[in-house]
Amino acid sequence: MHCFCIGFYIFKFLAQPNHMAITKNAFIRYQALDKCFRNPGRRFYIDDLLESCNEAIAELDPNSSGIKRRQLYDDITFMESSQGWSIPLERIKDGRKKYFRYDDLSFSINNQPINDLEAEQLKSAMMVLRRFKGMPQFEWINELLPKLDDTFKLSNHSDNIISFDRNEFLKGTEHLSPLFNAILYKQSLAIKYQSFKSDTERIIVFHPYHLKNYNNRWFLFGKSGNYNNLTNLALDRINEIQNSNVAYVDDKALDFDEYFEDIIGVSKEVNKNPIKIELRATKQLAPYIKTKPLHGTQKTISETSDGYSFSIEVIPNYELEQLLLSFGEAITIKAPTDFKRKMKQRIQKLLENFD
């Protein structure tokens, strides 16, 4: 694959635009101009170049209004610059007009090494791509990254610029790829599973629907056996996965965005409705709570110099309790009474550990 082509596809999907040339349809225009400049059988004047660019854009987006001359001149200037491809462009006079052509018709931007801008964007894309290594359907990254690195000599200290909260030694991630494929191809499974509450493992016939990551752990959602309710299995408690001969039971009515919108985490009690929970954060914690809401339903009740009062509407679960406990004395539960009492009991048991 040509150097430019590799850059083109990765930039299109991963790179963030931070230069005047990386605008909508820019690469389509550059390719169109490149074809015109190396065509020995026709003279391309400025209006011809503009028409060729707009025809190429229209093929991609029939509703586009195209570009004007000013953008075309900007594109040519960029292609001639060192940030572009330093194209060897001639402007040949023909009466009062002039046409454009490479002085070396064997030249093409597709045959050139990547420029400085592309190299920087490719480095950024590689940093993001590395975070997908080992994930299902991203096995190709393990082959692609070394090739890119060897071809373009991109290795530096860029890995120290950005990092993600990820546990590379997390047990169960080896199951991600087969589970992903089972969901994709609607395959029932026989899963050997041992929960933390049991001393022995059991075989579960499972119909997988969804994978979710929460708090650096992976969970598989689906239906088990003949039960109608959704259940979830922690991947780190799965010992073995095999395909099952049981017919896959699909549930096309499930919407997991909707399923998770009333909870924090992954636990959801059946037939429970969200409740309004009122909380108060200290003035020190308030900025963190406001800039990173606990839940999408978070609403401000009041704010004073002493603290920040707010509410969320969720179905209470273990993950919510753990989250609130993690704030320690910086947060107060104001209502409802039942939830407040339950949390108080947990804190009292916690205090007993320090006796």
Image: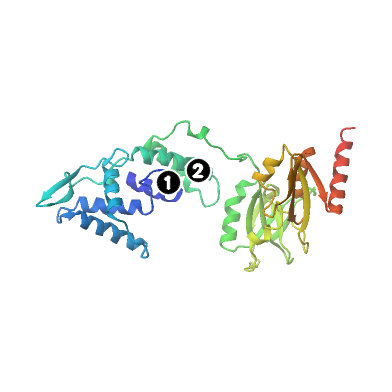
In percent of width and height, residue 28 lies at 33, 54
Q: Is mark 1 on a helix, strand or loop?
A: loop
> Could one spot residue 243 in this view of the protein?
no
Mark 2 residue type: Val
Which residue is at a point 78% across and 64% down the rendered structure image?
A: 271
Q: Can you tell which mark lies on residue 128? A: 2
Which residue is at a point 38% across and 50% down the rendered structure image?
A: 23
In percent of width and height, residue 229 lies at 73, 64
Which residue is at a point 60% across and 62% down the rendered structure image?
A: 187
Q: In which quarter of the image is the C terminus?
A: top right
Q: Can you tell which mark lies on residue 94? A: none
According to the picture, the residue beneath numbered tag 1 turns out to be: 17
Question: What is the C-alpha distance between the residues marked 2 and 1?
Answer: 15 Å
Report the side of 24 relative to 198 (left or right): left
Report the side of 15 relative to 210 (left or right): left
Q: Which of 102 and 139 is in front in this view?
A: 102
Report the side of 70 relative to 244 (left or right): left
Q: In which quarter of the image is residue 85?
A: top left
Report the side of 288 relative to 343 (left or right): left
> Could one spot residue 336 in this view of the protein?
yes
Q: How is the image coloured?
A: rainbow
353 w.r.t. 346: above or below? above
Mark 1 residue type: Pro
Q: Nearer the viewer, mark 2 or mark 1?
A: 1
Q: Which of 351 and 147 is in front in this view?
A: 351
- Label located before the other in sequence (2 or 1): 1
Q: Which of 234 and 113 is in front in this view?
A: 113
In percent of width and height, residue 24 lies at 38, 53
